[in-house]
Image: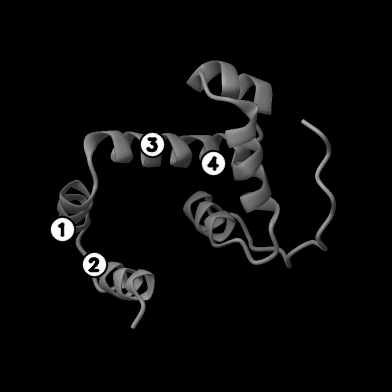
Amino acid sequence: MKPLAEIAAVLCGIQDPKTMDQLLRELFTGGELATLELRWRLLKDLFDGTPQRKIAETHRISLCKITRGSKVLKKRGSVVRKILEAARGDHHEPDPPDEPLPPP
């Protein structure tokens, strides 16, 4: 099994949030966790419709990082989008056709 597939399998087996939290803290440095948390916040902000420039200003990050998050959410079959929809209670619509992204 490839390392990423093995890690994914381990993560899938963890049902307890406290255990998951501990594992993440053991695997990643404080800086890596801060980066992960920031990525999650910007994805949630994008999903909620916050303008990219506002996200950049609020979190003091480049538009390039935000554009990557936007592409993830627009991608057909995006797992992140499905998770955020489920967390918000949105009814899942079929994936829209892939469209080119507007320039930032």
For discs 3 and 4, the disc positioned in front in the rendered view: 3
Mark 4 secondary-structure assignment: helix
How many other residues sit within 10 Å of disc 4, few (<14), some (14-19) or many (≥20)? many
Q: Amino acid at mark 2?
A: Gln
Q: What residue is at 33 percent from the left and 34 percent from the top?
A: 34
Per the model, the C-alpha gap separating discs 2 and 3 is: 23 Å
Where residue 10 appears, as percent x and y from the top left, is 26, 72
Q: Amino acid at mark 3?
A: Thr
Where residue 84 appears, as percent x and y from the top left, is 52, 51
Q: Earlier in the sequence, mark 2 or mark 4?
A: 2
Q: Which residue is mark 3?
A: 35
Per the model, the C-alpha gap separating discs 1 and 4 is: 24 Å
Judge by depth and name the residue closer to the eye, 64 or 69: 64
Q: Which residue is mark 1?
A: 19
Q: Which residue is mark 2?
A: 15
Q: Earlier in the sequence, mark 1 or mark 3?
A: 1
For discs 1 and 3, the disc positioned in front in the rendered view: 3
Where residue 7 appears, as percent x and y from the top left, is 30, 69
Q: Are marks 2 and 1 in contact (CB under 8 Å)?
A: yes
Does 49 sit above or below residue 81? above
Q: Are marks 1 and 3 in contact (CB under 8 Å)?
A: no
Question: Looking at the rendering, which quadrant does residue 17 occupy?
Answer: bottom left
Quadrant (top left/top right/bottom left/bottom right) for the N terminus: bottom left
How many other residues sit within 10 Å of disc 2, few (<14), some (14-19) or many (≥20)? few
Q: Amino acid at mark 4?
A: Leu
Q: Which residue is mark 4?
A: 43
Left or right: residue 13 versus residue 99 is left
